[in-house]
């Protein structure tokens, strides 16, 4: 499966159009908007439609700039899937997620982040490959040394649930950073987008 993961668009319609074209050209199976696709809950008209017009399957996750309720509404409007507190299987790949962050207006406590990820993982635990999606970055990683302190709940979920891949966004300056925690490959995705093959 080929995934285009994008974080922190913050309403940039021009960049969204470039990424939708890239996804079409690269025959991407799935697009994940990994939080903060709005700017303080202000949705840019046409942003999500850009991806839907290309016929691409779209998963959304709230960041710290949009509430889960806003993402629910936009997911229904554009035929997307809200990954917050949710999991789904595509072929033999299980994807589960928890949005928001441990700081900001739309924050979650660390135990709620961890419990949400455990719940999602439970739904796809028999999948051959597992992908964990969060907006906030795990604590004690390269990204947490660049920006804000990472999430202890996300780090504990990686240690405990051992997904094959973990994607996060949130720290703009960390875009492109890759590292491993145990056997989990973690990627910081951002506005440029990143194609990941699983």
Image (cartoon, rainbow, N blue to C red):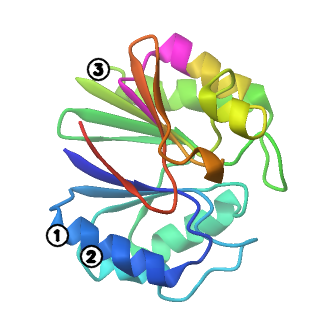
Q: Which mark is residue 25?
A: 1
| Label 1: how many Cα within 10 Å (few below 14, some 14–19, many 20+) | few
> In front: mark 3 or mark 2?
2
Which secondary structure, mark 3?
A: loop
Front-most of residues 179 and 92: 179
Residue 197 pos. (x, y %): 23, 41
In this view, 1 is above or below 180: below
User: Residue at 58% across / 57% down in the picture?
Assistant: 35
| Residue holding disc 2 | 21
Labels 3 and 1: the sequence-earlier one = 1
Q: Residue at x 76, y 28 (%)?
A: 110
Q: Does the magenta stretch include residue 160?
A: yes
Left or right of residue 36: residue 93 = left
The residue lying at 55 percent from left, 24 percent from top is: 118
Q: Against 49, is 156 above or below?
A: above
Where is residue 96 drawn, in percent x and y? 45, 37
Query: For the N terminus, which image quadrant?
Result: top left
The residue range painted magenta reads: 158-166
**Residue shown at 52% from the left, 55% from the top:** 190
Q: Mark 3 points at which residue?
A: 126
Do residues under tags 2 and 1 come within 8 Å of each other at their CB atoms? Answer: yes
Q: What's the distance in space between the residues labelled 3 and 1, CA to CA? A: 32 Å
Q: Toward which corner of the image does residue 106 lie, by quadrant?
A: bottom right
């Amino acid at each position: 499966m080929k995934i285009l993961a994008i974080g922190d668009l913050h309403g940039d319609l021009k960049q969204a159009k470039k990424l939708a074209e890239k996804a079409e050209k690269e025959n991407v199976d799935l697009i994940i908007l990994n939080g903060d696709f709005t700017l303080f809950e202000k949705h840019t008209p046409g942003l999500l439609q850009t991806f839907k017009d290309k016929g691409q399957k779209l998963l959304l996750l709230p960041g710290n700039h949009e509430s889960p309720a806003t993402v629910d509404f936009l997911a229904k409007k554009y035929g997307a899937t809200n990954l917050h507190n949710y999991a789904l299987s595509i072929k033999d790949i299980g994807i589960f997620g928890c949005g928001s962050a441990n700081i900001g207006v739309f924050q979650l406590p660390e135990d709620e982040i961890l419990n949400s990820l455990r719940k999602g993982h439970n739904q796809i635990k028999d999948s051959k490959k597992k992908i964990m999606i969060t907006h906030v970055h795990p604590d004690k990683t390269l990204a947490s040394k660049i920006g804000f302190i990472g999430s202890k709940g996300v780090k504990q979920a990686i240690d405990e649930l051992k997904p094959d891949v973990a994607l996060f966004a949130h720290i703009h300056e960390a875009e492109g950073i890759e590292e491993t925690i145990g056997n989990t490959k973690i990627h910081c995705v951002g506005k440029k987008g990143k194609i990941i093959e699983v």
